[in-house]
Image (cartoon, rainbow, N blue to C red):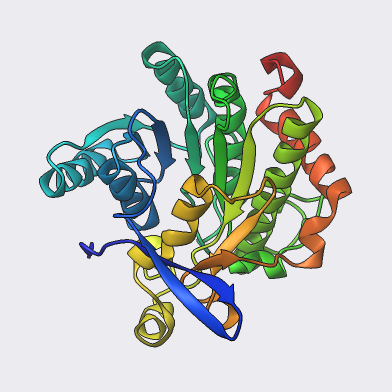
Amino acid sequence: MFFRQKSVLAIEQKQPGMKKKTPWDSGTMCGQKGRIVVVTGAAGGLGYEISRVFAEKGARVVMAVRNPQKGVQMAAMIRDMHESSDVEVMALNLADLSSVRAFSDTFHKQYSRLDILVNNAGVMACPYGKTADGFELQFGTNHLGHFALTLLLVDLIRRVPGGRVVTVSSLAHSFGSLDFDDLNWQKRRYSKWQAYGDSKLANLYFMQELQRRFEGKQLPLLAAAAHPGCAATDLQRHEGWLLPLNVIFAQSAAMGALPVLYAASASDVKGGGFYGPDGMWGMRGYPAKAQPNIRSKDMRAAELLWDVSEEFTGIQWQNLGG
């Protein structure tokens, strides 16, 4: 179900003797007219909501989807709500590096720049599987696919001062622990939840190392991450037991999308920053700074993951002018 719910963000403004919450919604969000935005996984859930809000604010939105037919349906829903919406659907399967390269080739032919890349798509706690290139499915899709996509598009992002890359992680990063000797689960007994947590930790490592490289080259670009808290989306389709809990704990996809929208558009977002809901345990609420766990701040691990990712994908940062 998709909700025609306005995006609302509350930012606390501290004043002497009081705490005031000022709402921030799609009506007060800064306009995005003239900006080009790519949103992966835009055919449902968070990706749809992110695309909808950006389109509402005037951006040219490229909805990158694994299922183009469904993507066309979602794009039509956005146009029905906002007749002037400028949305386009392009095929992208992050579990297949040839598809990632094809998307990049097509995008380069149509566009000369990219303002904002939202790495949102992902799979969660699915049975053991492999990507088209032989990588464990969750690590290959959630991390390697977005790693490859970002590097292939970074030349276009560099053309926009203030260009952003926002990667969607999860609270599950807190139990992630990458085994660099067995990233593709060829030696260990497979744990779908551990593999998911690992992939979400990898998202944070990637974001931080990308920001470090932006700063190392003195590029006026920003890499940040966000998580949706506990949001009711079809990402949970492999875990039916979670669905009843959504009634009690989960917030809507529209609410879950808010930290991502904030990271992608707010003027006070910091490079290397992590954003999520401000409620209890970060499960629901309005966007605020989130605290990743200590393990996610291990920059040696982040650099090692980057090197391994270049090896796995065959895409080198230095060959892209990075």
**Number of dots carrying numbers:** 0
The furthest residue to the top: 109
Between 20 and 245, the one lying in front of the other is 20
Query: In screen coordinates, is 234 left or right of 310?
Result: left
Most foreground residue, 21 or 84: 21
Q: Please tell me which residue is depicted at 30% across the width and 43% down the height of the picture.
A: 57
82 displayed left or right of 92: left
Position above or below: 144 against 161: below
In this picture, residue 75 sits left or right of residue 216: left
309 relative to 45, above or below: above
- Percent of width and height locating residue 316: 72, 22
User: Does residue 61 appear in this view?
Assistant: yes
* Residue at image coords 33%, 61%: 7
Task: Tell me which residue sits at (31%, 49%) in the image.
Answer: 53
Q: Residue furthest right?
A: 300
Pinpoint residue 16: horizontal percent, then vertical percent: 61, 80
Q: Quadrant of the C terminus?
A: top right
Q: Can residue 43 be seen here? A: no
